[in-house]
């Protein structure tokens, strides 16, 4: 198995849609979006970002040959006072490929690309507290907890808390 990592390109928006919907279907408790809502959308938000290719919004992908098996998204804030902040989103690796450090590598490549922009000084993310494997990956990459949002997500009668994490650029 030879895993290749690269930023998704305009022609990849269709395969991005497939894996994004897969992530929402297979791990519904891990994301703020729902499969039921997103599958109805003519175009997912990040499909546009992939097609338009800006340095401040991108998705890294992990490929096993031509098959997209993992994604990690990023966006940089655009407002003047918060342009120094970026956000990591939509981290997902297909279940058949977990435990092989693919998620960790996707995250590292996303961090490196984000910090290649000297304007970006810190990265933030949110992770559902029940997702222990994601916590481990984020902590290994240097992210630190800075807060907790209780009952951020609700599915039926069940609530999910979100752990807020930050990584500062090494000075």
Image (cartoon, grey):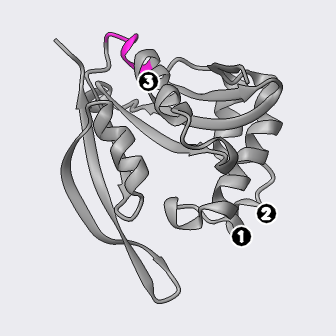
Residue 171 appears left or right of 18: left
Q: Position of residue 137 (x, y in %)?
A: 38, 39
Label 3: which secondary element: helix
Q: Are marks 2 and 1 in contact (CB under 8 Å)?
A: yes
Compared with 53, 46 (above or below) is below
Which residue is label 3 attached to? Answer: 108
Q: Looking at the image, which is closer to me, 68 or 51? A: 68
Residue 35 appears left or right of 88: right
Find residue 158 and report its image quarter.
bottom left
Q: Position of residue 153 (x, y in %)?
A: 43, 71
Which residue is label 2 attached to? Answer: 40
Label 1: which secondary element: helix
Which residue is label 1 attached to? Answer: 36
Give the mark toward the camera: 2 or 1: 1
Residue 111 appears left or right of 25: left
Compared with 5, 31 (above or below) is below
Q: Between disc 1 and disc 3, whose residue precedes?
A: 1
């Amino acid at each position: 198995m030879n895993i290749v990592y690269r930023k998704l390109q305009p022609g990849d928006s269709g395969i991005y849609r497939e894996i994004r919907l897969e992530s929402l279907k297979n791990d519904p408790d891990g994301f703020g979006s729902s499969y039921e809502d997103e599958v109805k959308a003519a175009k997912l938000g990040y499909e546009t970002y992939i097609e338009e290719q800006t340095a401040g919004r991108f998705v890294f992908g992990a490929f096993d040959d031509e098959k997209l098996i993992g994604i990690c998204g990023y966006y940089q804030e655009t407002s003047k006072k918060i342009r120094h902040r970026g956000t990591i989103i939509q981290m997902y690796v297909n279940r058949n490929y977990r435990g092989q450090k693919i998620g960790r590598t996707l995250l590292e490549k996303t961090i490196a690309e984000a910090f290649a922009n000297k304007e970006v000084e810190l990265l933030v993310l949110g992770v559902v507290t029940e997702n222990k494997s994601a916590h481990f990956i984020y902590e290994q990459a240097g992210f630190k907890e800075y807060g907790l949002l209780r009952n951020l997500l609700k599915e039926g009668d069940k609530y999910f808390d979100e752990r807020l994490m930050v990584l500062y650029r090494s000075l």
